[in-house]
């Protein structure tokens, strides 16, 4: 059993086949641990996806009822991973990553955060609309705040899907080029931007949380939030 209350936060939209694998897997993996809550944070509407802002929303929704959080992509299922409390951030995934990630610098996919560290960096940036680079900025935010993070080399099963950052010809998508440009544009002034952009200026509205179901029955502490986070500009 987890020794403190963990909230797993999953940014989500439009991947029903992954949701259908993830929810039963997590219910089974954690054996309905009473110290675990799980939050699917679904972006309402059809506008461009914003993973960083959704993760901030999940944090805002879950923070009061949890001691620490884990930001979790829906397409990685834990097989052997350590979700226990950590006083500093920790990447929980290594085995099962599929895009040639760098062991030293990759801080994404499945990342644990204690609340003080996450609040010190003011959360994720809210302004990355489209695939990628909000996690690259997360890493820089940690560096700037002097927050070191751990690597726990957990093993996960990855669920396949079409890559939204690179097209079938290996060319970066328009979305990826835009978020990459934003990352480099913000980088020199990030120290000044960080306190102004993130948890501190987060705006959203949420429908009442609905329980996630398995075989028609609610899974205790598993929640589905549909949230309106607006759009770019
Ligand atoms: N995601 C989603 N719908 C989308 C895009 C992203 O639900 O249209 C969520 C989902 O949790 C996914 C995560 O954001 O696992 C990361 O996005 P993606 O899998 O596209 O990134 P990559 O595989 O390139 O890391
Ligand atoms: Mn993915």
Image: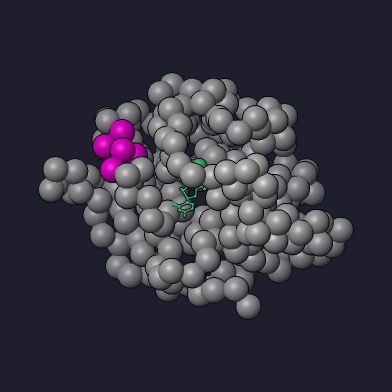
How many numbered discs sit on the rendered protein? 0
Question: 6 left or right of 125?
Answer: left
Q: Is residue 92 visible?
A: yes
**For the C terminus, which image quadrant?**
bottom right
Q: Which image quadrant is residue 33 in?
A: top left
Drawn side of residue 89 relative to residue 196, left or right? left
Instruction: State the image coordinates of residue 221 (x, y, percent, origin top left).
Output: 28, 47
Q: Is residue 134 visible?
A: no
Vertical comparison of 217 with 93: above or below: below
- Which span is picked out in magenta? 20-25
Residue extending furthest front? 169
Rendered image quadrant of residue 103 = top right
Q: Residue at x 26, y 37 (%)?
A: 24
What type of secondary structure mainly makes up the magenta span?
A: helix
Q: Which quarter of the image is occupied by the N terminus?
A: top left
The color scheme shown is one colour
Residue at image location 54% in from the left, 61% down from the top: 50
Q: Position of residue 216 (x, y in %)?
A: 13, 48
Q: Position of residue 130 (x, y in %)?
A: 59, 60
Residue shown at 43% from the left, 63% from the top: 43
Kindly give the residue lying farthest to the left in the view shown. Answer: 216
Identity of the residue drawn at 60% across and 73% down: 232
In percent of width and height, residue 181 lies at 76, 59
* Residue, far right: 188
State the residue in front, 103 or 206.
103
Looking at the image, is 157 positioned above or below residue 185? above
Q: Nearer the viewer, residue 29 or 122?
A: 29
User: Taking 22 as reference, is 194 above or below it?
Assistant: below
Residue 21 is a magenta residue? yes
Does 70 lie within the magenta span?
A: no
């Amino acid at each position: 059993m987890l020794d403190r209350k963990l909230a797993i936060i999953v940014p989500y939209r439009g991947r029903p086949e992954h949701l259908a694998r993830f929810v039963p897997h997590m219910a089974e993996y954690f054996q309905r641990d009473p110290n675990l809550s799980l939050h699917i944070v679904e972006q309402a509407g059809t506008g461009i996806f914003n993973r960083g802002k959704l993760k901030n929303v999940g944090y805002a929704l879950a923070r009061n009822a949890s001691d620490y959080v884990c930001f979790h992509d829906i397409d990685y299922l834990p097989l052997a991973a350590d979700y226990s409390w950590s006083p500093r951030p920790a990447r929980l995934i290594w085995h099962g990553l599929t895009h040639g990630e760098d062991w030293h610098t990759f801080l994404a996919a499945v990342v644990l955060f204690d609340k003080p560290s996450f609040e010190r960096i003011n959360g994720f940036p809210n302004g990355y609309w489209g695939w990628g680079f909000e996690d690259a900025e997360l890493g820089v935010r940690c560096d700037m705040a002097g927050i070191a993070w751990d690597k726990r080399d957990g093993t996960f099963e990855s669920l396949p899907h079409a890559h939204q950052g690179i097209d079938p010809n290996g060319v970066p998508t328009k979305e990826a080029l835009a978020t990459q440009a934003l990352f480099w544009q913000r980088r020199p002034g990030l120290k000044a931007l960080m306190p102004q952009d993130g948890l501190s200026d987060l705006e959203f509205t949420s429908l009442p949380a609905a329980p996630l179901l398995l075989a028609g029955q609610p899974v205790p502490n598993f929640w589905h939030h549909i949230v309106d986070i607006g759009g770019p500009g």
